[in-house]
Image (cartoon, rainbow, N blue to C red):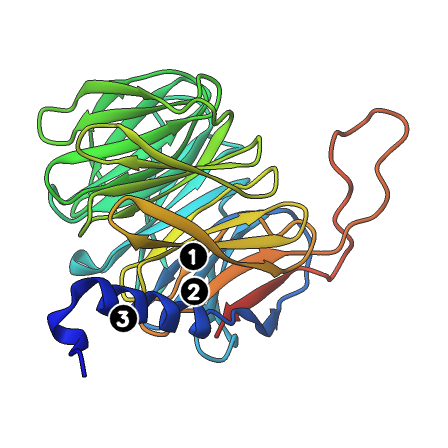
Amino acid sequence: MTSLLKTPSLLLAFVCASATALADYRVLAQFKIGGEGGYDLLCADSAARRLYLSHGTRVEVLDADTGKKVGEIAPTAGVHGVAVAPEFSHGFTTNGKDSTITMFDLKTLQTLKVIPAHGKKPDALDYDADTKQVFVCDSGSGEIAVIDAATGEFKATVALSEGLEGLVFDGRGRMFVNDEDKSVVFVVDTHALKLIATWPLAPGEGPTGLAIDRGHHRLFSACGNGKFIVLDSDSGAILTTLPISKDPDGAAFDPSTGRAFAPCKGGTLTVVQEESPGKFSVLQTVITQFGARTIALDEKTGRVFIPTAKFGPMPTDGSSHRPPILSGTFTVLVVGQ
């Protein structure tokens, strides 16, 4: 009998078949929050078992296992995103309505400092453990603001372009940022704080969510026109284009399974896996709920959290381009196997 261990192709086929068989993602639970106000990005602190959710003028803080509310960070007017820097016990929020960044204590959730944004519409942000800094996308002014995670002091800005969305780091001195307006990925040297490359995403248009596989040097860019673009994070070469639904606003990658996720507004979550070097496929499309388009991965359990709500009819008077969120319906879907 041929040994699988001595036949790499057979072993790979066996592993891929097993992975496909195990891909049974579904909505396992809902964390019902209620209240008023819109929602946007979220952050899962897997080690501390906390989930941070932007919600109108505050950040809801939940137990990541039970969904029980453990506190909130407020006021954070028009909050968009949350990032945590555990080694300093600091968290940060971007507040779009007053163009500020709130630094808070991870243990007490108390505000430590309110930092004026140095650009317009601070939105996505993340902490880079390599440089010990928080990088903030000021989407309205096309700049990246750089903040010292230990002190909350503003350090510098990096000029890019308007329309900045998701950002990720490779842990080796480079940051990648989606630009929704230009349909490119900007590559920034996080030590020199300068733009070093611009990679086009065509046929992808309107990229928002961005995820990274650091181990295999892959980028996953979720684009508004229903394309999930996979790139080599060293060269920028497009490896493949996969179909997803339209209007995603987030992406995630699970290093324990090698799977990438793209949540889309219409109510689907696409799960993608690399079957062999450079070959990717859609493993599963999970039915979620309308409006469920941002995402955070729980690295401990492999589950993902996707916020959403129920919506009323679209206004006919032209007062808004979005349907209203119905009071008391804000919730988080917990998707896993």
Sequence-earlier tag: 1 or 2: 2
Q: Label 1's element? A: strand
Residue 216 visible? The answer is yes
Image mark for residue 152: none
Q: Which residue is mark 1?
A: 296
- The N terminus is located in which quarter? bottom left
Query: Mark 1 near mark 2, Cβ–Cβ under 8 Å?
Result: yes
* Crowd rating for badge 3 (residues with CA inside 10 Å; few <14, some 14–19, many 20+): few
Q: Is residue 236 above or below residue 46?
A: above
* Crowd rating for badge 1 (residues with CA inside 10 Å; few <14, some 14–19, many 20+): many
Residue 296 x/y as whole percent:
43, 57
Identity, as a three-letter code, of the amino acid under mark 2: Leu
Q: Nearer the viewer, mark 3 or mark 1?
A: 1
301 vs 224, left or right, is left
Report how far apart the C-alphas of labels 1 and 2 lie in the structure. Answer: 9 Å
| Residue at the image position 81 percent from the left and 27 percent from the top | 319
Q: Nearer the viewer, residue 261 or 48?
A: 261
Q: Nearer the viewer, residue 203 or 111?
A: 203
Q: Quadrant of residue 50?
A: bottom left
Report how far apart the C-alphas of labels 3 and 1 lie in the structure. Answer: 14 Å
Residue 14 x/y as whole percent:
31, 71
Q: Nearer the viewer, residue 2 or 260?
A: 2
Residue 253 x/y as whole percent:
35, 54
Q: Label 3's element? A: loop
93 vs 176, left or right, is right
Q: Which residue is mark 3?
A: 47
Q: Which residue is mark 2?
A: 51
Residue farthest front in this picture: 1
